[in-house]
Amino acid sequence: MSKRQHHQKRCPDCNEWFDASLDICNHCGFEHRKKIKKELQKRRDLSDFSVPIWQVHPTDPIWLQIVKRPIQVVQLILYAIVAFFIYLSTACAH
């Protein structure tokens, strides 16, 4: 047995086993991560990798900027609380 073992995955197109680290089946050429790559590219195009908070644009009227800033702070505090509970649940699971 070799030192490094590869995980195997079954191709939904040809039903053959292939190395799961590959993007393309070496038997039929089916591209397995095509849907995932398409979604990632769509998110990159939309700059959707950031935490979804209200954006304060320089073109917003001053009253709207004043209203949006506290909302951003509250959103970040809520994200921090959720992250803390996720941390606690994973830390207590061990």
Image (spheres, rainbow, N blue to C red):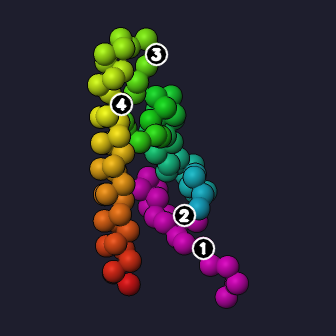
Distance from the alpha carbon under mark 3 to that under mark 1? 51 Å
The amino acid marked with disc number 2 is Ala
User: Where 30 falls versus 26 (above or below)?
Assistant: above
Answer with the quarter of the image where residue 3 lies.
bottom right
- Direction from residue 24 to residue 4 in the image, left or right: right
Disc 1 packing (10 Å; few <14; some 14–19; many ≥20) = few
Say what secondary structure mark 2 lies in. Answer: loop
Task: Measuring from the top left, give residue 33's x and y in whole percent.
Answer: 50, 48
Residue marked by disc 1: 6
Q: Which mark is residue 58?
A: 3
Q: Which of marks 2 and 4 is nearer the N terminus?
A: 2
Residue marked by disc 2: 20
The amino acid marked with disc number 1 is His
Residue marked by disc 4: 69
Q: In terms of secondary structure, what is the magenta stretch mainly?
A: loop
Say what secondary structure mark 3 lies in. Answer: loop
Q: Does the magenta stretch include residue 2?
A: yes
> Outermost residue toward the right?
3
Q: Which of marks 2 and 1 is nearer the N terminus?
A: 1
Q: Which mark is residue 26?
A: none
Q: Which of 66 and 20 is in front in this view?
A: 66
Q: Which residue is drawn at 40% across and 27% down?
A: 55
Q: Residue at x 50, y 28 (%)?
A: 45
Q: Nearer the viewer, residue 20 or 59?
A: 59
Say what secondary structure mark 1 lies in. Answer: loop
Distance from the alpha carbon under mark 4 to that under mark 3? 12 Å
Disc 3 packing (10 Å; few <14; some 14–19; many ≥20) = few
Distance from the alpha carbon under mark 2 to that under mark 3? 47 Å
The amino acid marked with disc number 3 is Pro
Disc 4 packing (10 Å; few <14; some 14–19; many ≥20) = some
Q: Are marks 2 and 1 in contact (CB under 8 Å)?
A: yes
